[in-house]
Image (cartoon, rainbow, N blue to C red):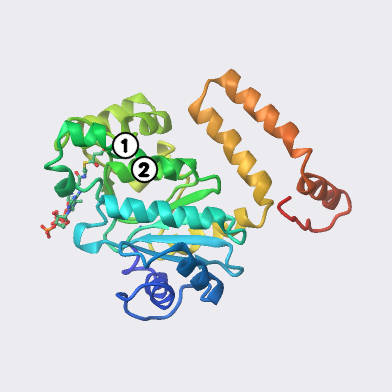
Amino acid sequence: MSLARACACTHGLTHMWHSLVCSRAPPARPPAGSRSAPRGARGQRRAGPPFQFLQVQKAGSKGSVGLIRLQRPQALNALCEGLMAELRRALDAFEADAQVGAIVITGSDKAFAAGADIKEMQGKSFQQCYGGAFLAGWDRVATVRKPTIAAVNGYAVSVPVSLRALCRVPHARGRDSWRSPPAVPITPSPGAGGTQRLTRAVGKSLAMEMVLTGERISAAEAKAAGLVSKVFPVDKLLDAAISCAEKIASNSKLVVAMAKESVNAAFETTLAEGNRTEKRLFYATFATDDRKEGMTAFVEKRKANFTDS
Ligand SMILES: C[C@H](O)CC(=O)SCCNC(=O)CCNC(=O)[C@H](O)C(C)(C)COP(=O)(O)OP(=O)(O)OC[C@H]1O[C@@H](n2cnc3c(N)ncnc32)[C@H](O)[C@@H]1OP(=O)(O)O
């Protein structure tokens, strides 16, 4: 997602972040559909110290969207350990926030992210990697129960491709090509799930080519391969992602989480196990007030009023 050129939202997000948490970003007008209400600000302050590598805020007309912008421009948002720790903290905060129903992760003008931080990895030993469980915490993006949308602008290299594959409703901008996965020219092989999630997302042939050559694919190719769900002009990308997140957030958060778990089972287990998971979760929805409310509202021809219970 490269936004500054084409999306006024970018600057607005910066402004909101500035007013909420950080001390670095320049002020500008808020993005369409974003919310500068103090609830987000209070939420961020309660969540811990200011973020150094992220802008974090709530967006959408009801503040129901958690918006995270990777903000490490000098390294094209390379995913250093500090950034990933902040990302986990931001995700934890949104996961615990009852107002938030979906999360959008985006990047900066030039890059969604340039992969793992090569300079940070360069001097690591096997002992440090294995003993310190290097990259182990990155799976947090995959375990978030609320839906995550990756609005991908600019470069998405290696790990970000995994990151994007982790986000369940990825969107991409419709211009430029981005280099995707592999880090084979730089590292022995990808190590953050790039060979596993990418292969399941796009199939073995394309994954093999991407991983072994490190060549870029375009947004259109990514869509054709099923790696992203939609492609937008750069100036529409973030608004579209927020709008999609708002739509998700307007549904029962409880049932949305169950549906997400069910879809993920198709990605992570066998067909038989996935079908069992789906059935169990389907039955479980009958224990919720929201299932009853949804069906009753349909029969009574009115809008459902979900209580997330
Ligand atoms: C664990 C995983 O599975 C494996 C991995 O993720 S390994 C990492 C994979 N990532 C990559 O291979 C991407 C490396 N980056 C690039 O190829 C190029 O930067 C790019 C094609 C994305 C952009 O190129 P370009 O526009 O010319 O910008 P470039 O000058 O290279 O980068 C700008 C700055 O960001 C830094 N940077 C870019 N990617 C970085 C990375 N992954 N780690 C650390 N720093 C990085 C550059 O060193 C440079 O810093 P400098 O100004 O201090 O020299």
Q: Which mark is nearer the camera, 2 or 1?
A: 2
Identify whether 233 is placed above or below 214: below
Residue with the most extreme left position: 123
* Location of residue 162 in the rendering, given as x and y in whole percent from the top left corner: 35, 40
* Location of residue 246 in the rendering, given as x and y in whole percent from the top left corner: 59, 59
Instruction: Return the residue at label 2.
Output: 138
Quadrant location of residue 282?
A: top right
- Ligand 1 is within 8 Å of the C-beta of the residue at disc 1: yes
What's under tag 2, amino acid-wise?
Trp
In the picture, which quadrant includes the N terminus?
A: bottom left
Instruction: Return the residue at label 1.
Output: 192
Whether residue 263 is visible, yes or no, is yes
Which of 277/183 is in front? 277
| N-terminal-most mark, 2 or 1 | 2
What's under tag 1, amino acid-wise?
Ala
Q: Is residue 75 left or right of residue 85?
A: left
Residue contact at pointers 2 and 1, CB within 8 angstroms: yes
Which labelled disc corresponds to residue 91?
none
Whether residue 152 is visible, yes or no, is no
> How far apart are the two marked residues, 2 and 1, measured between alpha carbons?
7 Å
Q: Is residue 45 left or right of residue 85?
A: right
Quadrant location of residue 141?
A: top left
Residue with the most extreme right position: 300
What residue lies at 34% left-to-right and 34% top-to-bottom?
193
